[in-house]
Amino acid sequence: MPYISLDEHLPGITGLLEYRQDTAKPIRELTQILLRGDSTLTQGERELIATLVSSKNQCKFCTAAHTAAADLLLGESETCELVKQDYENAPISAKMKALLAIAALVQQNGKNVTFEAITRAKEAGATDMEIHDTVLIAALFCLYNKYVDGLATFTPSNPEFYEKLGERIVNLGYNRPKYGFDEIKKQNESLIQSIS
């Protein structure tokens, strides 16, 4: 049960962003730039960073949402699951392993990022911009995870909800829909069968 009055048909961060649209606007814009803007990292790779950090923070809503988006962008579901379990042995590039190692360090504490971790990423071919964006995505998702869980937002247990949310993230990005969320609320009513 959320600690503040939120619409249960807009679970997780969606309800929070709708609750406070003035603070939501810059949050959405930054997320859109980092996860959907121009980058030498694919959208799927950036969603993997978001997924790993959310998983390590044990944020069920964000982990499920970004796993669904990453799976769609990667075209399969095995990689994301393996990354969450053990990214060092997942079927991803050495560069992505090094960037995910940096993201995991940021998730613990920004000061845990070491010269060695940065050197590893650079030696694996990561650019300064890729390292920058990895750290920023990881830090941003720590904020999101704490925002979602700190206000005890609704977290649907129905996997189909997250499949639809992943499709929306992939197809529409992170901007607020032009006409709001009325249509999404209607769709969610049938998908939210229980709140865990």
Image (spheres, helix red, strand yellow):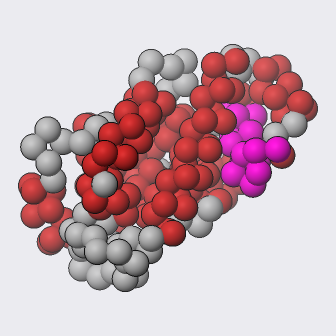
Can you say which quadrant of the picture contains the N terminus? bottom left
Residue 104 location in percent, x, y?
A: 72, 48
Q: Main secondary structure of the magenta part?
A: helix
Q: Position of residue 125 (x, y in %)?
A: 73, 18
Based on the picture, tell me whether residue 103 belongs to the magenta stretch. Answer: yes
> Which corner quadrant holds the C terminus?
bottom left
Q: Is residue 61 above or below residue 81?
A: below
Q: Is residue 167 visible?
A: no
> From what the image shows, is residue 193 above or below residue 111?
below
Q: Is residue 52 visible?
A: yes
Magenta span of residues: 96-111
- As rendered, which of 53 and 148 lies closer to the eye? 148
Q: Give left or right: position of 65 versus 108.
A: left
Q: Taking 189 as reference, is 34 left or right?
A: right
Quadrant hosting residue 84: bottom right
Which residue is at a point 10% across and 56% down the rendered structure image? 182
Residue at 31% across, 45% down:
22
